[in-house]
């Protein structure tokens, strides 16, 4: 888990319930290593008192305890705090007991002795889901729709959300596709179930298959235990698959089978596992163009895009810019300024500059621009020069073709540099992608993604 994820889990509240002092304290230390706020209770009745004093996001409880069993505690928790996730631990596990607990709302059922890494992984995953859910609520205000183009998109999102059909979100990078996916889930009929996201471009095929389908113990080097994939973990919820265009043709075929048959076959396993989930995919490319070149399967395109929603770029929705800018300004002030400092105001010249900019990085670029301006402004007013928008062609929207020519030229220059830089790294490593990635200061998956985008064949350097 990255340091950023640990920071996010500091808001997570966990209650550990067990009548065995050593085990309870050990679990508290173990889950506390994730950065969470962890409390302890020695039995079910003490746990209910602790929850009345302050609710918990996750309760980890033993099954057999004096005065109140973990199963009875589960029932009370789900009645009083239905959003709290419960993990049941027991040294006397049976299939029937596990089924009963799951039916009563338990998120997981583990038998003792359990693997410390497994319990940490389960808590971490549940914690990420909870953090994501909170982020949905706090970020929904960013779905600004003052502009007619965005109002039309919002109307389509509202109509599509309750439907279980697969949805394809199309739009440039930075237009907020993951935010829209979260809103679609929140307004769906399965909003009480998990929302799980994965970026297809960030993982090579084998790891992506393991992440989505799961794997058996020993399926590959490092697979020291069985793991469920996100399709199975979704439990009727939503799986968001970003940058679907980056999937290889062979993996596209495997995904198509999952969508058609609603079964997955975990890596290293011979039996299929039935799954239930709603798929939301996203792309920043024109998939129909990729179909014509053979890079994307037409049958998969129709399967994932039963409903297609296009997110307009920020340059095509200028009426949304002032309210988005003000929202980002208030957030940046809370994040970057002392608690007693007042948020700066946007001057008219700054608003004019914001409306005139082409925003090649879309909403994400606007957020970064405002955050930087909040930091550099010193007299309580953000002026145009604080925005750092720079290039003279970005100061007016009159000459769109010049703007496009500039951006295209810049992109060609970047790609030329990347080809030369990566080519030299591969030359030095004799075509070894892992060594080349290390020398470039990036992950192997990131280097492979750039190589695919630029059409670089490592075999030329062997």
Image (spheres, grey):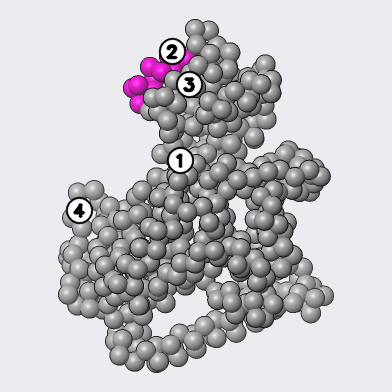
Q: Nearer the viewer, residue 415 or 339?
A: 415
Q: Nearer the viewer, mark 2 or mark 1?
A: 1
Q: CA distance from mark 1 to mark 4?
A: 39 Å
* Residue drawn at 60 percent across, 38 percent down: 121
Q: CA distance from mark 4 to mark 2?
A: 45 Å
Residue for badge 4:
341
Q: What is the x, y in percent for residue 240?
A: 54, 55
Q: Earlier in the sequence, mark 1 or mark 4?
A: 1
The numbered mark at residue 192 is 1
* Residue drawn at 69 percent across, 77 percent down: 294
Dot 1: element = loop
Mark 3 burial class by Cα count in 10 Å: few <14, some 14-19, many 20+? some
Q: Earlier in the sequence, mark 1 or mark 3?
A: 3
Dot 3: element = helix
Q: CA distance from mark 1 to mark 3?
A: 17 Å
Q: Which residues are magenta?
A: 44-54
Residue for badge 2:
45
Q: Seen in the image, is 15 located left or right of residue 431? A: left
Residue for badge 3:
75
């Amino acid at each position: 888990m990255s340091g950023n994820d640990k920071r996010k889990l500091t808001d997570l509240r966990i209650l550990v319930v067990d009548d065995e002092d050593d085990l309870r304290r050990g679990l508290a230390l173990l889950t506390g290593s994730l950065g969470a706020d962890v409390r302890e209770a020695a039995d079910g009745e003490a746990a209910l008192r602790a929850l009345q004093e302050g609710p918990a996001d996750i309760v980890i409880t033993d099954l057999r305890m004096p005065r109140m069993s973990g199963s009875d505690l589960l029932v009370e928790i789900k009645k009083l705090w239905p959003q709290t996730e419960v993990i049941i631990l027991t040294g006397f596990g049976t299939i029937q007991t596990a089924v009963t607990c799951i039916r009563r709302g338990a998120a997981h059922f583990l038998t003792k002795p359990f693997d410390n890494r497994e319990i940490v992984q389960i808590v971490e995953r549940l914690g990420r889901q909870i953090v994501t859910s909170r982020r949905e609520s706090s970020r929904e205000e960013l779905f600004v729709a003052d502009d007619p183009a965005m109002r039309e998109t919002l109307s389509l999102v509202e109509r599509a959300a309750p439907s279980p059909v697969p949805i394809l979100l199309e739009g440039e990078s930075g237009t907020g596709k993951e935010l829209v996916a979260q809103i679609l889930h929140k307004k769906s009929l399965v909003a009480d179930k998990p929302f799980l996201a994965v970026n297809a471009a960030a993982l090579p095929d084998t790891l992506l298959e393991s992440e989505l389908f799961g794997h058996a113990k020993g399926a590959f080097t490092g697979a020291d235990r069985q793991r469920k994939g996100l399709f199975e973990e979704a439990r009727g919820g939503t799986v968001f698959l970003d940058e679907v265009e980056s999937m290889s043709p062979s993996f596209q075929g495997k995904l198509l089978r999952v969508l058609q048959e609603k079964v997955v076959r975990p890596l290293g396993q011979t039996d299929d596992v039935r799954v239930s989930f709603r798929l939301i995919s996203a792309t920043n490319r024109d998939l129909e163009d990729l179909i014509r070149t053979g890079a994307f399967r037409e049958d998969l395109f129709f399967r994932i895009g039963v409903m297609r929603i296009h997110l307009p770029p920020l340059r095509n929705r200028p009426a949304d810019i002032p309210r988005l800018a003000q929202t980002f300004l208030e957030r940046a002030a809370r994040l970057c300024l002392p608690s007693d400092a007042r948020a700066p105001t946007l001057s008219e010249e700054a608003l004019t500059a914001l409306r005139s900019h082409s925003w090649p990085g879309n909403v994400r670029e606007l957020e970064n621009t405002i955050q930087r301006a909040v930091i550099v402004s010193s007299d309580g007013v953000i002026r145009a020069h604080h925005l750092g928008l720079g290039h003279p062609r970005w100061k007016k929207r009159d000459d769109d073709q010049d703007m496009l020519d500039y951006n295209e030229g810049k992109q060609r220059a970047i790609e030329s540099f990347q080809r030369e830089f990566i080519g030299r790294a591969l030359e030095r490593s004799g075509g070894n992608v892992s060594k080349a990635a290390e020398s470039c200061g990036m992950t192997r998956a990131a280097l492979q993604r750039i190589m695919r985008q630029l059409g670089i064949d490592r075999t030329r350097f062997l």
